[in-house]
Image (cartoon, coloured by chain):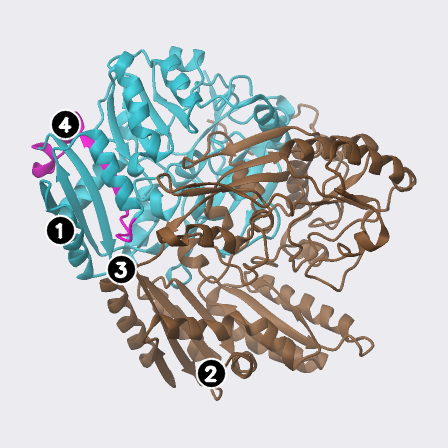
Chain colours: A cyan, B brown
Amino acid sequence: MTEIFAPPDSNQVAEAVSQAVSAGTTLDLRGGGSKVAYGRPMDTDAILDVSALSGIDLYEPEELVITVGAATPMAEVQSVLAEANQHLAFEPPNYGHVLGHGVGSATIGGIIACNLSGPRRICAGAARDHVLGIAAISGRGDAFKSGGRVVKNVTGYDLSKLMAGSMGTLGVMTEVTLKTLPRPTQTRTVLILGIDAETGLKVLEQTAGSQAEATGLAFLPKLQSERSAVPVISEADSVTAMRLEGAGDSVADRAMVLAVQHKDAKVQILDHEDSLTYWAEIRDCTLMPTSGALWRISVPPASAAQLAGRLAVDCDPEILFDWAGGLMWVAMKDDDPCEGLVRDALDSLSGHATLVRATESIRRTIPVFQPQSDPLAELSARIKEAFDPQGILNPGRMVAGQ
Amino acid sequence: MPEPNQDVIRRSGELASSLAAVLPKGAVLDREDQRRVYESDGLTAYRQMPLMVALPETTDQVSKVLTICASFGAKVVPRGAGTSLSGGALPLADGVLLGMSRFNRILDVDYANRCVVAQPGVTNLAISDAVADRGFYYAPDPSSQIACTIGGNVAENAGGVHCLKYGLTTNNIQGLEMVLMDGQVMRLGGRHLDQSGYDLLGVMAGSEGLLAVITEITVRILPKPQTAQALLVGFDTVQAAGNCVAAIIAGGIIPGGMELMDGPAIRAAEAYAGAGYPTDAQALLIVEVDGTGEEVKVLAERVSGIAADHGASTIRASASDQERVTFWAGRKAAFPAVGRISPDYYCMDGTIPRARLAQVLSQIAVMSERYGLGVANVFHAGDGNLHPLILYDANNPGELDRAEQFGADILRLCVAMGGVLTGEHGVGVEKRDLMGEVFTEQDLAQQQRLKCAFDPDGALNPGKVFPTLHRCAELGRVHVHGGKTRFPELPRL
């Protein structure tokens, strides 16, 4: 049976890691456990359960800053921010629907460690852009910190960004300081119904380059839209969606202006409540199927249609386009991830593909994350060694043997 | 600074000819009059002649130069336009100064993917200019944007007046090509969002030329906001202005720019630029709101209301875009304006939590008395970045030293208030010895281990950022406690 360490505070986390260093014990880092199925499977000696590192240490809404224990549940962070009419602008997603776990156990540390961002990524930045500072325990058992509680800061290397997206392979985050922002009070979504993917993506590209200040740009084919709980969406043959957000009545006016620009097409405007429901569906990936291999692919937005065309020929997947085409959710018909085709197609474009869902044996045999060029892979290995020389923290979670 | 390597200095002729063999004619400068140009950057109090200067034009040449330098054991100091205010590009007596000025081309403007691919020697403003006719711009706008290069911006993670809403350099770059000290070339990110693997883009931003030499940058460009309006708001006290800033943000408004100047800065700027500032005010806020026409109208009204509620003595809204630009002209000229009222000034760059502003300024005033040196303060109120300009005269013996001590005290105060040593100018040589105020030995050791992963011989820009340089072998040791259970009290489930 796998041993479980559950230190009650950050000092004890440091001691647990030091002890693991001494004994050569490899550790599987756990916060809420909502993402155990994400990344490469691991065979570790023990689980380091850091769920005790939970709670809000500091929240100053006027300073737009919050400091929390790394394992604070997302739901708790979001509800505290909502009380002050604020939020985390990168729109943290919950992939429970596609990863097969219950909703609600995601922690802030997990979101940051995976650098996951929702539809607002296109204008608000990624999770990593909202991290102001971190405290962590390295794979040597040493506590270190980086950043601070202010937005503008070049005091030393930005290790906070390095920790974001490193999947717990470089250190055990114990505390995270994040930038908070005012929450928009009004949301509208301008929909164009029934156009094909290529035309829809062109509309999104044009809107992204315009002064409309859209905060969400997505295209859904019929298969995805019909799973929506919003009636006008579920009845459509396809949905090209443009979200506008802001502080007051002007949002409705802006939606009218944008809708009039597309008056020759079949246009609808979603009200505030329906907009919230719909964008949560896109953010949390709940319009994708619950079985079969699933990719999350980041590409130059203008290449999305081309990539979709190439995948359609051999694999015939379901595809949802977010980030004006820059983020493609690609669901295969069965467990076969069509890996060769996905990676080959990306070779000629810039971008990267993550195999978010696949059977354990497939995730053991093919790279879950985009393979890197040799010099970059070697540099990454040296960075891993600089933080975790014994390779005890989440070994193999990102790259086999590392 | 690290002790110069006499062997490298002795072999400088040999090194120069090896470099000349891989570079275009005239791209290695080793005459004294040629090297003199590079002896300092924007922090002119520090000067050092470089051993020689190399001016490569291609990534391949950069790779060869670094390989050759590594084989000689020579240090390398990269330099963009040399506008650093922290001595980031200060040369070394035994080091090759790697001038990136010939990497001056914009390689691609990609409107469909809303990005620009540029070489590192392109100026910040040139990127915005290149995309202006299609209504786009590059968001970070440091005051030196007409001269500073995008490569230097990445190295220092440059900001500007729009950071709160639009982010710093690190939030606006998507891809890099870089060369390590061993000559290896690699690419990070690209025209897509987010990178796979470790966030090395995030690490490179603000790395002050210590990790790798940047040879290409992909930046994201944004559509210009439809409209923008600026409000000039005068206050009788800094405290009232600070409260107004907090209330604007608490009211859910994130202005495109929000700048604060104290009395001495207002009067210097007005005398210099004639921007129409209220010279009797003790604090002046410039608040700019931008966005669609509908949104701007609503926001400007709300900001005016908040300002009135906080006892503003004057409120003026720009009636035209021309007037808006005039409002900014005074603030953007604040540094030269202060240069006119004092023979020399020393520009500091701390960041503090916004709410501590009044407290920090009153303590700076006390220090100003104590050191007998005047000070004018400009403050990026939106993001808490404070630039006290210490007035001194280098011709008066001892004044520069006093100014430096005064500056160090200000930075210590910023840290004590929950802030940091530098918001956008970098640590460089200037604030290197204050790093211990912010970081523990263990924090600094971990940062240096990262440096070791990129540059194990410590040859890239040594002497900057870190107060003490440890050898990588020493940092790499792991302390294993003999496999004993040191912590029997640890809960085990």
Q: Nearer the viewer, residue B267 or B469?
A: B267
Q: Which residue is mark 1?
A: A260
- From what the image shows, is residue A108 above or below residue A387? below
Q: CA distance from mark 1 to mark 2?
A: 48 Å
- From what the image shows, is residue B388 above or below residue A56? below
Q: Which residue is mark 3?
A: B292
Q: CA distance from mark 4 to mark 1?
A: 24 Å
Q: Which residue is mark 2?
A: B237
Image quarter where the C terminus of chain A lies is: top right
The residue shown at (77%, 76%) is B399
Residue A222 is marked as: 4
Q: Chain of mark 3?
A: B
Pair 4/1: label in front: 1
Residue farthest front in this picture: B25
Q: CA distance from mark 4 to mark 3?
A: 32 Å
Asked if labels 3 and 1 share a chain, the reply is no
